[in-house]
Image: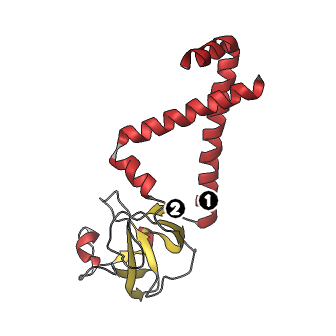
Amino acid sequence: MFQSEIARFRKLGVQGLLFQALNFLSVIASGLMMWKALCLVTNSESPIVVVLSGSMEPAFYRGDILFLWNPANVPYAVGDITVYRVPGSEIPIVHRVIESHITNTTQLLLTKGDNNNETDTMLYNGMEWLERKHIIGKVRGFLPYVGYVTIAMNDFPKLKYALLGAVGFFLLIQKEHEHA
């Protein structure tokens, strides 16, 4: 099975293999450019996130993919579902705004998960309120359960490398067949 593929790679030669590698790198670069463009359009550092916990049930469940928008110069309102990250924490948190206070220069927010009994002040790492700079975006849409693929790849890193390797391998094989 693999012997025929190895023979095809040998037949390609160094130039052919470099061409295949460049094609693969161009696919990766295109994906990164699309991600950066989406970040610019949505004004969010991470316009797509996966729900990792059940704190927002029944609105969102673990594994849901959320699409974010961070409108410039538009204050967040009570009831908005936001994704925020506080200093000292790597994981973004998806919770609902339950209080908002606007001063001349800043909007202060208090959030809480729909499925939680307490507000998020314990999650703010010593701060009493969230500021606009902590907000990644407001939830504008979602796809249920599609994010379980991402959760599985994070929980099982070998699965991530196996999937990436398989995709790369099939890209190389498909390109090879197109030139044959």
For image coordinates 50% across by 74% down, the residue present is 138
Classify residue 57 by image quadrant: bottom left
Are dots 2 and 1 in contact, CB under 8 Å? Answer: yes
* Front residue of this view, candidates 34 and 165: 165
- Asked if residue 113 is positioned above or below residue 20 in the image, the reply reads below
Q: Quadrant of the N terminus?
A: top right
Disc 2 is placed on an element classified as strand
Q: Which amino acid does label 2 sit on?
A: Ile
Residue with the most extreme right position:
179
> Left or right: 140 with respect to 133?
right
User: Quick one: label 1, few (<14), some, or many (20+) residues within 10 Å?
Assistant: some
On residue 48, the disc is 2
For image coordinates 68% across by 11% down, the residue present is 11
For image coordinates 52% across by 62% down, the residue present is 48
For image coordinates 30% across by 79% down, the residue present is 115
* Front residue of this view, candidates 75 and 171: 171
Disc 1 is placed on an element classified as helix
Residue with the most extreme front position:
1
* Front residue of this view, candidates 98 and 48: 48
Q: Which amino acid does label 1 sit on?
A: Leu
Task: Locate residue 75, reporting x and y percent.
Answer: 51, 82
On residue 38, the disc is 1
Task: Locate residue 62, reporting x and y percent.
Answer: 38, 66
Task: Locate residue 119, reporting x and y percent.
Answer: 27, 81
